[in-house]
Amino acid sequence: MKEAALFIFLIISTVFDIKSRTVPAVIFAISGAVGIMAYIATGTYLSGGIVDELFGVILGAVFIGVALISGGKLGMGDALAILVIGIYLGGSGSALVVLYAMMITAAFSIVLLIIRRGNRDTALPFMPFLLAGCVLQQIGAIA
């Protein structure tokens, strides 16, 4: 159920990011609140899962800091999405999602450079890559 809520958040965010390059703050707020409620409802904090969950939130906070100092190279919405993913998946899961998303983004960027459809300043919406990274992370969790 937690994963379904995360995927709904990422799909909605991806649509907004592609169409308007922004994701409404209310989507982050609702998704984060649902993630916290799901965390409490599942009781994983009772089994020592709180440390990994805190690392997920810390990872999101680090990316918020990067967004603030990067001059817009990383959007605040992308950083908030990483924070929400951290709430749902904890530190190890969200770190894998971000790693996969960055690798896919890099490969896509290289293709754009090769076919001369972009340059080093071309801005890409990151939510679709976070969604793809989450799919890959979940496939790895199943396998």
Image (cartoon, rainbow, N blue to C red):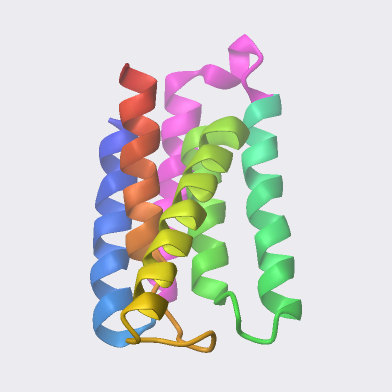
Q: Is residue 111 visible?
A: yes
What's the magenta bit mostly, secondary-structure-wise? Answer: helix
Q: Is residue 119 above or below residue 42?
A: below
> In which quadrant is the N terminus drawn?
top left
* Residue in front for this viewpoint, 18 or 100: 100
Percent x, y of residue 113: 41, 79
Q: Which residue shows up at 23% across the image and 70% down it?
A: 15
Determine whether, in the image, residue 66 is placed left or right of residue 104: right
**Picture coordinates of residue 117, whole percent (x, y):** 32, 86
Query: Any magenta on residue 82?
Result: no
Q: Which residue range is magenta in the image?
A: 23-50
Query: Residue 23 appears at what percent x and percent y?
Result: 38, 75
Does residue 103 sit above or below 71 in this rendering?
above
What is the residue that sits farthest to the top in this orientation? 47
Residue 119 position within the rendered picture, expressed as x and y whole percent measured from the top left: 47, 87
* Residue at image coords 52%, 49%: 98
Q: From the image, which quarter does the C terminus lie in?
A: top left
| Front one among 79 and 110 | 110
- In the rendered image, the residue lying farthest to the front is 114
Identify the residue shown where x is 32% and y is 62%. Answer: 128
Residue 120 appears left or right of 56: left
